[in-house]
Amino acid sequence: MKKIFFLIVIFYQIIICSCQTNDKSVGKGLSKAKIQEYQKSIDKYTKAIEANSRDYISYYNRGTLKYNLQDFKGAIEDYNKAIEINPNMGTAFNNRGLAKHALKDYQGALKDYDTAIKINPGDEFPYYNRGHLKSELKDSIGAIEDYTSAIHINPKNAAAYHNRGNVKSDLHNYQDALSDYNKSIEINPDTAIAYRNRGFAKKELQDFKGAIVDETKAIEMNQNDSEAFYDRASAKQGLKEYDGAIVDFTKALELNPGYERAYSHRAECKKAIRDYNGAIEDYNKSIGINDKNADSYLNRGNVKSALQDNKGAIKDYNKALEINSSIPITYFNRGTAEFGLQDYKIALEDFNKAIEKDPTYAVFYNNRAMAEIALVQKENGCKDLKKAEELGFEDAKKAIKQYCK
């Protein structure tokens, strides 16, 4: 799931938070009136600078306005000037770091955040923004440390708890992530994304009912959030409420027609209620969006196999293996389809490959045994059946009685 992080821009003296997400740019979607308001303010600061070229506060504030209008290069120029006049202005380094971050100058941004912290170690915002950048650079431990520093400075920083929760969630530390989301919502109960992300953590912890409650809250606050509908659908799927899940996956797709995962997971639900043709249609759409996803071919092949279309299933398994040859279940399923076509020798080769990649899966040995027995390799077949029984496959006992007397 794509998580939203927040960045903070600071106006001089008056702390006004202009939040930026990691997938939406600052200024995107600004109203025409707001743009005009910003431009008037820029003109005002320009006149102030013309009257006093050493007015670093006007450079700073003009730079922040330019940042909010996505003029990142212009913002950097103004922050450069403010820093040239006042090299101890930590907030200018912080905001210049944000502008560099937006331009993907990550190392430059890190240096600016470092300098801002050195100038004013009691300022929460450079820690906070550096934490976001470290998270983006996959330095999860560093990101958590920075968000923690921001929280120590300001224990009421809801966004810092939220972002730290996101990093922990990305590390699959869902229980600790849940604690951070709880704290974030306690401080600020009016942020839809916090409920959505907490719902995701609950879902991963198998608390499907709790996840549904949170995702429903997120949807009430933002009915255009396709991710919230997707996550609620996934939680319903976990409860085997397939019809309700299909409704939510469908809504997610209405909001985001290119949502590949929503098609593939809706297909899983349709398969569960035996709507095999509907499932194949959804896998077709998923593959149309991303034809490099081995799982989509594997799962479509499984549906075709359920429809006794073994030849069609094998074509899909071939494609899945062409993309990713490391998944043992794909070899196993292809072998099973080949067995269904009475191509026992080729099936045996695939069962061998499946076991080579995962020797702990009991049913792999069971099916290989069936292929071996069909090829009149009774001794090998009986050995595999006994192995399947040892690994806990109960049906192997019946087969042993039938074939291994």
Image (spheres, rainbow, N blue to C red):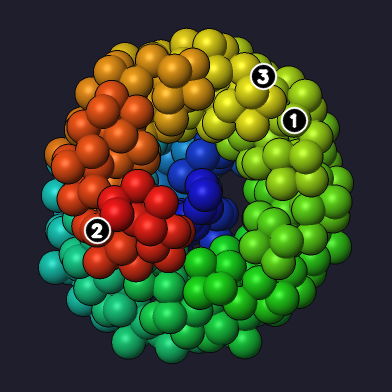
Q: Position of residue 343 (x, y in %)?
A: 38, 15
What is the secondary structure assignment of the residue under circle 2?
helix
Write down the residue under mark 1: 276
Residue at 66%, 72% (x, y): give it: 208
Question: How many C-alpha atoms fall within 10 Å of the one at disc 1: few (<14), some, or many (≥20)?
Answer: many
Q: Which residue is labeled 2 in the image?
A: 386
Q: Residues within 10 Å of mark 3 (few under 14, many from 20)?
A: many
Which label number is shown at residue 13? none
Which residue: 80% across, 35% down? 275
- Label 1 is placed on what type of residue? Tyr
Quarter of the image with the C terminus is bottom left
| 297 relative to 263, above or below | above
User: Amino acid under label 3?
Assistant: Lys
Compute the Cα span from label 3 to label 1: 14 Å
Tell me what residue is drawn at x 77 percent, y 24 percent: 277
Q: Nearer the viewer, residue 391 or 179?
A: 391
Q: Earlier in the sequence, mark 3 or mark 2?
A: 3
**Residue pointed to by mark 3:** 285
Left or right: where 91 falls relative to 224: left
